[in-house]
Image (spheres, helix red, strand yellow):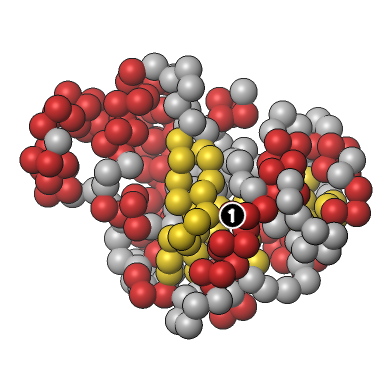
Amino acid sequence: MIPAHDEAKVIGRLLRGLLESARPGDLDIVVVPNGCTDATADIAASFGDAVRVVETPEASKAAALRLGDTAARGFPRLYVDADVELRTADVHALAAALDRPGILAAAPSRALNMTGRPWTVRAYYAVWTRLPEIRRGLFGRGVIGVTAEGHTRIAALPQVMADDLAASLAFAPHERAIANGARVVVHPPRTLADLLRRRERAAAGTDQLESAAPDQPGGSARTGVADLAAIARRAPWLTPHIALFLTVALIARHRARHATPTTWQRDNSSRA
């Protein structure tokens, strides 16, 4: 299921990857254009019977997910952001992971496309990708798959900005998995300013989630000083990167405290 708000620039790229080696009837792809003012729905519909388009005039990811859930036909079920890249083989690997006993939710490994990104953005993510919770959590990947039981759990979550983080923390570590053989390509912010805006939203979303659902089975995904110290010990050459990481984090948290929360925010630079 793909909620899509003004995703004309990227929806075709995602759908081509999903369908590149799919057999007829192999996948049930539901695209939910919501509040779109561009050609998102037309591009999705151009893929023919392989893609079902369920459109709504309401610009809301939460509403799009609810609508998509009513249209979806079975499990396992994947929720996919329109601005990532995922292929047929990755979907099958995720389905295999969700078929393992006790696993209720799964996500692919993460590959960041750093083409054209400045040193500041690359330095930030050099630290971010080494954080323990980033490595084992399901969030920050743009793809989460669930079983029927897993879906029941995430459907009961409060509506929050950090919906992928909420979904990840809804499962204890032994109930979730990073699927072997599955990979998603994620497009990070293109400038330092874009990065700061994205991290501000993330900080506000984490605060909102901890207030709305303080007792998640998956615990907390916050970064601790011990995490950064461990990275510095293992890779001393990352010390300047850690300094930049901390600076971005502190600025983002300061801005988040003075921001007006909203449930519809995204980084448009990943759609460039």
Q: Position of residue 203 (x, y in %)?
A: 36, 43
Q: Quadrant of residue 155?
A: bottom right
Residue at the bottom extreme, as displayed = 101
Nearest the eye: 82 or 49: 49
- The residue sitting at 76% across, 67% down in the picture is 72
- Per the image, label 1 sits on a secondary structure element best described as helix
Q: Position of residue 4 (x, y in %)?
A: 71, 44
Residue identifier under label 1: 90
Nearest the eye: 49 or 139: 49
Q: Amino acid at mark 1?
A: Asp
Please determine whether, in this image, residue 169 is positioned above or below residue 148. Answer: above
- The residue sitting at 29% across, 26% down in the picture is 123
Nearest the eye: 64 or 210: 64
Q: Is residue 89 left or right of residue 27?
A: left
Q: Position of residue 251 (x, y in %)?
A: 29, 29
Image quarter of the C terminus: top right
Q: Is residue 67 visible?
A: no
Q: Is residue 185 left or right of residue 224?
A: right
- The residue sitting at 56% across, 69% down in the picture is 96
Q: Quadrant of residue 213?
A: bottom left
Image quarter of the N terminus: bottom right
Q: Is residue 14 left or right of residue 73?
A: left
- The residue sitting at 39% across, 35% down in the picture is 200
Count up the numbered dots: 1
Q: Position of residue 60 (x, y in %)?
A: 68, 48
